[in-house]
Image (cartoon, helix red, strand yellow):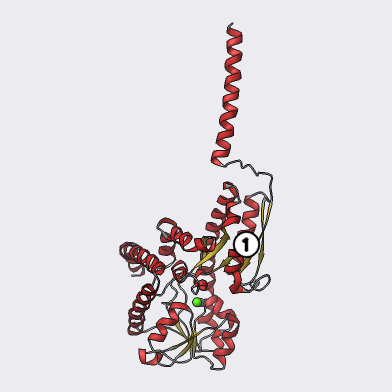
Amino acid sequence: MNKILSIVIIFTALVMSSGCNEQETSGSGTVSADAGKTYKWKLVTTWPANFPVFQEGVERFAKDVKTMSNGRLNIKVYAGGQLVPPLGVFDAVTQGSVEMGHGAAYYWAGKVPAAQFMTTVPFGMTASGVNAWLYAGDGIKLWDEIYKPYKLKAFPMGNTGVQMGGWFNKKIESIADLKGLKMRIPGLGGKVLAKAGGNPVLMAGGEIYTALERNTIDATEWVGPYHDLRLGLERAAKYYYYPGWHEPGPALELLINQAAWNSLSPDLQKTIEVAAAANNVWMHAEFDVKNQQALQELREKHSNIEILEFPAEVLAEFKRLTKEVLQEEAAKDPVFKKVYDNYETFSKQNSQWDAISEGAYRRAAMK
Ligand code: CA
């Protein structure tokens, strides 16, 4: 009897444990139902081929995903124009002709004005505040919400850090110097410049050098020392101003077609999320390193250039006008207002903490 009972118990235990395993497997998603399935995805970017840091970071992400998924998720990366035009990325991912895209959310301001907060806004937060808001505040949640009508999911992937204020062919000593100034400066920054009396001009990266060199424009912003030097802007204008008040910590975005995302098992979704976060950090670090080196090169090899800080009066006026621009945009669009309110509340708290942590420490360390 005892022997039979123990066999029954062992049998029952085996059945139960195998049943449990099955439940755990499908419940936690650690071993997925499609463990043998491989995916071939396409990712289109808004960047030129071989564009350092930007396109490089995306290629790196694709490699990481392939390694981490043990070859199950293969993402082929296309630069801007190779498959779709650079500014066709949003539509291509929405329509599902490709599964993924990479760019900056403020490129889609015409469709989704609130998306600008997901990249950067003038006098907004720097990279550390932006990441805090996106990951640990409501940022990514709001991002998904504003992209829901477009059937898109987004993750931050890359941050340029504080950009430079730009190249000018004359000194900017007061607001009066901005009167009639033709400057290549996109988005909300452009709207602020217009309020200050300037003429913002929209222009793709490839056209900037010639326009500035031939005085078609009087000034331009681009990225930071590294990318600006690659365009040769130090040969087209003499005065290089800082800080980039208009782009204090632009986050780049990874776009995913929602249906394609939903088709993935939880382990592959997690792979994408983690690889995007890893390359968010990598790109920011890379921008910092390359900009430090390029700044040194500018100082040592291009002594004809003057690297100047915008006068306090000019920055104060830009800041005042930024508030006007943001409030005007919020009055036009309730979605913009919702994201603006959330961003502003977070940003205020963040700056109070920053003042007695990073801010106070920086002042102490520089003494
Ligand atoms: Ca810029």
**SS class, disc 1:** loop
Which quarter of the image is occupied by the C terminus?
bottom left
Residue kind at label 1, given as amino acid type: Gly
User: Few, some or many C-alpha atoms within 10 Å of disc 1 (few <14, some 14-19, many ≥20)?
Assistant: some
Q: Residue at x 68, y 71 (%)?
A: 82
Q: Quadrant of residue 363?
A: bottom left
Question: Where in the figure is residue 114, as x and y percent of width and height?
Answer: 44, 69
Check disc 1 and report the residue beneath it. Answer: 96
Question: Where in the figure is residue 45, as x and y percent of width and height?
Answer: 61, 68
Number of disc labels: 1
* In the image: residue 287, left or right of residue 320: right
Question: Where in the figure is residue 263, as x and y percent of width and height?
Answer: 61, 51
Above or below residue 180? Residue 332 is above
Front residue (pair 16, 147): 147
Q: Quadrant of residue 121?
A: bottom left
Question: Where in the figure is residue 14, as x and y percent of width and height?
Answer: 60, 23
Q: Can residue 27 be seen in this snapshot? A: yes
Q: Residue at x 66, y 49 (%)?
A: 70
* In the image: residue 172, left or right of residue 82: left
Above or below residue 104? Residue 6 is above
Q: Can residue 358 be seen in this snapshot? A: no
